[in-house]
Amino acid sequence: MSDLQALVAQLERAVAEAADSSAVEALRVQFLGKKSQLSELSKQMGKLADEQRRVFGAELNAAREAITSALNNRKQVLDSAALDASSRPSAWTSRYLVAASRWAACIR
C-alpha cells in the first residue's frame, strides 16, 4: 500500500469516528492543510523525473479528491442529522401546544 493509499485509509477511519461538524473541520485541516501529510508528499514531486511526476501527481490529485469527498459526505450526513434533530419538536413543546390548543378551545 502506497503512502497515499494509507493516508486515505487513515482519513476514512477518522471520518467514520467524527461526531460533529467541528471534528470534520479539524480533520480537513489535518489532512488538507498547509502542514498536512498530503502537503509534505506534494513537496516531493520536485525531486521526481518528469514521467514519475505525472504519475505521482495524478495519484496525489486522486487522493486529494477522495479525502475531500469523504469529508464533505460526512459533514453533510452530520449536518442533516443535526437539522433533523433540531426540527423535531421536543416533548415540552408538544405538551405546550396541546395545552395552548385546549386553552384556546375553552376561550371560544
Image (cartoon, grey):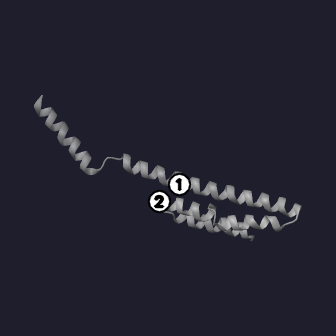
The residue at the point 27 percent across, 51 percent down is 91
Front position in the image: 92 or 43: 43
Label at residue 64:
none
The amino acid on which the numbered mark 1 sits, given as a three-letter code, is Lys
Front position in the image: 33 or 24: 33
Quadrant where the image shows the N terminus: bottom right
The residue at the point 62 percent across, 62 percent down is 33
Q: Which residue is mark 1?
A: 75
Label 1, label 2: how far apart the Cα atoms are: 8 Å
Counting from the top left corner in percent of width and height, residue 2 is at: 75, 70
The residue at the point 47 percent across, 49 percent down is 80
In this figure, what is the number of numbered marks? 2
Q: Secondary structure at mark 1?
A: helix
Q: Which residue is mark 2?
A: 20
Front position in the image: 83 or 29: 29
The residue at the point 49 percent across, 57 percent down is 21
The amino acid on which the numbered mark 2 sits, given as a three-letter code, is Asp
Q: To which quarter of the image does residue 35 belong?
A: bottom right
Q: Secondary structure at mark 2?
A: loop
Q: How crowded is the residue under tag 1: few (<14 C-alpha within 10 Å), some, or many (20+)? A: many
Counting from the top left corner in percent of width and height, residue 51 is at: 88, 61
Q: How crowded is the residue under tag 2: few (<14 C-alpha within 10 Å), some, or many (20+)? A: some
**Measured along the vertical axis of the image, is residue 6 above or below residue 105?**
below
Residues at discs 1 and 2 in contact (Cβ within 8 Å): no
> Which numbered disc, 1 or 2, marks the residue that appears first in the sequence?
2
